[in-house]
């Protein structure tokens, strides 16, 4: 149940922004226990799920029956075969939901190519919750730093030092079977697989990633990202070396969508602001230009303006008399790297609000 609630609030709003799910034809690769299938089916989508584990198919059917949802079409097949298996069907969006990292390298390339070929023009290929190989910490398989960067032969040995180590007899000695099982546990994914399967990233229409979407929609996420050295500076460092790669490929987990067949390659990487105006022009995929307003005001706003913005976007946050009227924003002297920066005790407090409070505010 916890996973279902997580999917409803973390992924569904973002997926709806990529492609309205109501009446959409959706293929989910790796339906697992069915929580994501249910979350998507609740939106009115015509969803089809596949998995290679018979028990996962049975569990998904049981879960949907318990909730009284119309049973979607579930198939026991491999992701590498979807192009031929669904040759007579068409889908608006194909989602690899926490499944790409459990495939071997040849399977990843083959399944991405098959999904891309199966999509019609304008269809969307979406990868959700794939741990990023470029990130410095692996919290998916090992809970160890720099684990993603290790070759498989070293990683399988070093994994024994992790608290997450599976003391299965198959891992007691090195063998092809042990290596395959280790890769099935989950290894990092990066933009390199996408380029090998689909072509250069610069030629793909990469849509807004989940992280960028969420920090626009939720002030607490935006404030937390602004205060985070671990996320913001690591992403900046990676993107400085590969500026042509969209930022969604540099997050701890890859949550991205790619539209097929668009002739206007515009990456939505979030609005930027110049020094004199809080609005900038941005070319839309249709070729027209529009003005975007920053979600919570540009950082050049005065302290009183930002206080009003917080009151507007955090209803009830200042309801407690202890915090009412105490918001004061202090301006810091410009640094060499950044022209202006603001700090405040109340903003620091806002960034520490728990995920439960963040859920209530969405």
Image: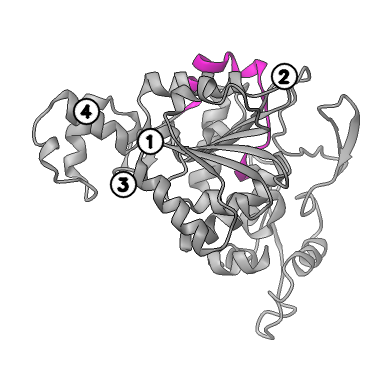
Name the secondary structure under disc 3.
loop
Report which residue position mark 2 lands on.
Answer: 261
- The mark nearer the N terminus, 3 or 1, is 1
Residue at 46% from the left image edge and 18% from the top image edge? 110
Q: Quick one: label 1, few (<14), some, or many (20+) residues within 10 Å?
A: some
Task: Report how far apart the C-alphas of labels 3 and 4 lie in the structure.
Answer: 19 Å
Eyeballing the image, is 260 above or below 215? above
Q: Which of the 4 image quadrants contains residue 93?
A: top right
Left or right, 172 with reference to 274: left
Q: Which residues are magenta?
A: 190-211
Q: How many marks?
A: 4
Q: Which residue is mark 3?
A: 143
Q: Distance of mark 3 from mark 1, alpha carbons?
A: 27 Å
Of the two numbered discs 2 and 3 on the same chain, state the one appearing first in sequence.
3
**Which structural element holds mark 4?**
helix
Disc 2 from disc 3: Cα separation: 39 Å
Residue closest to the eye, 17 or 208: 17
**Residue mark closest to the camera, 4 vs 1:** 1
Q: Which residue is mark 4?
A: 179
What's the distance in space between the residues labelled 2 and 4, CA to CA?
Answer: 38 Å
Q: Residues within 10 Å of mark 2 (few under 14, many from 20)?
A: some
The correct choice, above or below, for 19 with respect to 215 in the image is above
- Please name whichever residue, 140 or 290, is drawn nearer the observer in this view of the structure: 140
């Amino acid at each position: 149940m916890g996973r279902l609630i997580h999917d409803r609030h973390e992924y569904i709003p973002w997926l709806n922004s990529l492609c309205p799910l109501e009446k959409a034809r959706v293929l989910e690769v790796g339906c697992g226990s069915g929580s994501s299938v249910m979350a998507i089916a609740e939106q009115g989508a015509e969803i089809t799920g596949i998995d290679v584990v018979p028990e996962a198919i049975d569990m998904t059917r049981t879960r949907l029956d318990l909730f009284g949802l119309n049973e979607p079409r579930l198939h026991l097949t491999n992701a590498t075969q979807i192009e031929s298996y669904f040759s007579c069907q068409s889908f608006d969006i194909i989602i690899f939901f926490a499944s790409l990292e459990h495939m071997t390298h040849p399977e990843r390339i083959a399944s991405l190519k098959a999904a891309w070929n199966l999509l019609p023009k304008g269809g969307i290929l979406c990868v959700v919750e794939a741990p990023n190989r470029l990130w410095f910490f692996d919290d998916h398989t090992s809970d160890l730093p720099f684990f993603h960067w290790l070759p498989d032969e070293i990683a399988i040995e070093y994994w024994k030092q992790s608290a997450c180590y599976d003391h299965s007899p198959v891992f007691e000695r090195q063998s092809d079977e042990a290596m395959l099982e280790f890769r099935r546990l989950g290894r990092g994914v990066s933009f390199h697989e996408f380029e090998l399967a689909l072509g250069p990233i610069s030629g793909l229409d990469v849509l807004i990633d989940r992280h960028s979407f969420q920090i626009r929609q939720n002030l607490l996420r935006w404030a937390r990202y602004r205060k985070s050295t671990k996320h913001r500076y690591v992403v900046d460092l990676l993107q400085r070396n590969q500026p042509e790669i969209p930022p969604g490929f540099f997050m701890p987990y890859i949550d991205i969508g790619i539209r097929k067949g668009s002739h206007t390659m515009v990456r939505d990487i979030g609005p930027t602001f110049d020094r004199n105006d809080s609005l900038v022009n941005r070319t839309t995929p249709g070729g027209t230009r529009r003005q975007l307003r920053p979600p919570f005001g540009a950082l050049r706003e005065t302290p009183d303006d930002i206080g009003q913005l917080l009151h507007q976007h955090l209803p009830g946050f200042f309801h407690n008399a202890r915090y009412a009227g105490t918001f004061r924003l202090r301006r810091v002297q410009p640094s060499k790297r950044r022209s202006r920066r603001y700090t405040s005790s109340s903003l620091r407090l806002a960034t520490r609000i728990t995920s439960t409070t963040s859920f209530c505010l969405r």
